[in-house]
Image: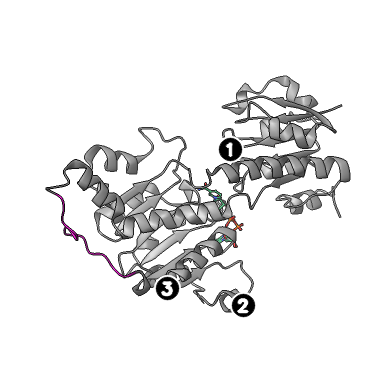
Amino acid sequence: MLKIGILDRITIPDLEERILNSIGKIICFNATNECELPNEIANLDAVIVYNKITLTQITINKLLNCKVIVKAGVGFDNIDICAAGNIGIPVINVPDYGTNDVADHTFALFLSYVKKIGFYNNALQKNIVQYWKPGNGKKVHRLSELTFGIIGMGRIGTAVAMRAKAFGMNVVYYDPYLPDGYDKTYQVKEFKVLEELVSNSNVISIHVPLNRNTEKMINYSLLQNAKYKPILINTARGKVINTEDIYLSLKENIIEAYLADVFESEPPSDNTELLLQFSLEDGIFRDRIIFTPHSASHTIEARKEMREKAAISVKMFIQENKMKNCINYNILQRNNYYE
Ligand code: NAD
């Protein structure tokens, strides 16, 4: 009987068992840090990992019997995929479980801010008689007058673009890795230079993966190109922006608002989340910030899809030696594990 380890998050593997019980036994470790994982992980034939823990080279090198690592999720910045590739372990992700859920959430943040829903709601709940003032000092624009800029026109970026188009907005994107022609397919404008997208957008929504090239790519010097005091939305990863620079950009009115589902360190700590401190303690940016706790993809349907697709990936690899969505294939090839 093979041993399949779910390293974090899942404690009752009912969905996974339905898919995997014919090939192996599932063991849940429920770790909150990779240091908690016992030596027994050396016997695992396959691993499913969520995002509660980081899998560094040290832990990966202990997976002596492991044939495949499946990341139950899209972003894989918590796994050292090079370390896995160097010892012949493919890493597979589940790229599509929550595409529409994250796009919906991105748009919900945007609509809530731009139509001042949170602002009015807070005011009316304080005192409905005193604050019954449509407008109430806030300038609200017609959506179709705004340009919605997307950085990273992949699955989620495109799904967000579709929503913005449906609201009659002018949609533009920047994605240097997308082959030519998608601007024509989607009928949206492509900017080949990031600074130009920033300077031409009223809204900027980030949908890139976190990696060496994208870490802190949204920073003070980039945002200084903004002409229209844009609303910045981040549902990708907290480390793609420089938090201190966002604070400065809000303070200097370079950006109008920051709407975020993701943070530099999660869960945030008092010391590291400068932005959180300023919004919650001083309250000076309260009306210009909306935060959610990395909940963009948290729908019942997306959770189920993610778990089932992760289990199916393990089954496909173990039973049929088939892999889809392998994210370290080039590293495996470089090390002569695959042709
Ligand atoms: P995807 O791989 O389909 O798309 C990412 C796009 O970003 C690609 O088209 C790629 O070419 C582009 N890109 C990469 N580097 C870039 C750069 N430097 N500049 C501009 N574009 C660049 O991924 P996706 O499914 O759209 O997901 C995007 C990210 O969203 C994930 O990597 C993940 O970190 C994040 N995410 C967040 C949540 C959440 O709950 N908030 C859920 C799922 C995914």
The amino acid at mark 1 is: Asn
Q: Which mark is residue 51?
A: 1
Which secondary structure lies at badge 2? loop
* Badge 2 density bin: few <14, some 14–19, many ≥20, Cα 10 Å: few
User: Magenta stretch mostly in which secondary structure?
Assistant: loop
Q: How many tags in the picture?
A: 3
**Quarter holding the C terminus?**
bottom right
Label 1 lies in ligand 1 vicinity (Cβ under 8 Å): no
Give the Cα separation between the discs numbered 2 and 1: 34 Å
Give the Cα separation between the discs numbered 3 and 1: 36 Å
For disc 3, the marked residue is 168
The amino acid at mark 2 is: Gly
Q: Percent from the top left, x then y, of residue 268?
A: 42, 36
Locate residue 289 relative to residue 6 in the image: left or right: left
Front residue (pair 236, 226): 236
Find out whether residue 143 is within the magenta segment: no
Say above or below: 307 vs 152.
above
Residue extent of the magenta highlight = 131-142
Front residue (pair 151, 329): 151
Which secondary structure lies at badge 1? loop
State yes or no: discs 3 and 1 in contact (Cβ < 8 Å). Answer: no
Determine the residue positioned at 31% across, 50% down. 289
Determine the residue positioned at 37% across, 52% down. 259
State yes or no: discs 3 and 2 in contact (Cβ < 8 Å). Answer: no
